[in-house]
Amino acid sequence: MALNNFFNFIFGWAVNISPLIGMIVISFFLTLIVTLVYKWTTDQVMMKSLKDELKQHQKEMKNYKDDPKKMMEIQGKAMEKNMKYFMHSLKPMIITFIPLILVFGWLKLTYNGIEVLFGLSWIWSYIIFSMIFSIVLRKVLKVY
């Protein structure tokens, strides 16, 4: 009840304007928070380095697609880098998980039975908007 009142206070104005505008505002705000937490809780220099190494391994795999032995060797290195990248991404996921679940509970109550975008439910609309905002925010904020 208290959380519903809190989220109504924070986001209710946008939902009252229109369900679509409300979802756009909420998606942007949540995606911004998650992106900033990710940026502040990870070593961005190391994350960029790992991402660059993964891209390099992908290029190498394309060059050795006819050599299964070399391909497996490169794949092993890529998996090792991927695991390291994932482990460093885990901390921001843990930090943002519970707050997002609480907001999603409120969204479910608020948007129950309301079509937001092209007949889609709130969850699909949120996913679409958050993917778009995530791509833009990560580029603008240089998050790797």
Image (spheres, rainbow, N blue to C red):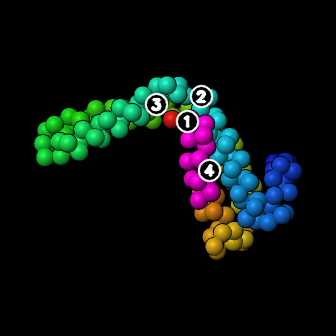
Name which residue lies at 16% across and 37% down. Answer: 70
Task: Establish if 5 lies above or below 88.
Answer: below
Name which residue lies at 83% across and 49% down. Answer: 10
Task: Establish if 123 lies above or below 85.
Answer: below
Find the distance from the CA under tag 4 to the CA under tag 1.
Answer: 13 Å
Q: What element carries label 2?
A: helix
Q: Point out the tag, 1 or 3, that comes first from the N-terminus.
A: 3
Amino acid beneath label 3 = Lys
Amino acid beneath label 1 = Val
Q: Is mark 4 on a helix, strand or loop?
A: helix
Residue 88 visible in the snapshot: yes
Residue 133 coordinates in the image, percent (x, y): 62, 50
Which label belongs to residue 41?
2
Q: Point out the tag, 2 or 4, that comes first from the N-terminus.
A: 2
Q: Is mark 1 on a helix, strand or loop?
A: loop
Q: Nearer the viewer, mark 2 or mark 3?
A: 3
Residue 114 coordinates in the image, percent (x, y): 72, 71
Residue span colored magenta: 128-142
Asked whether residue 59 is drawn in magenta, I would say no
Residue picked out by circle 3: 48
Front residue of 124 and 48: 48
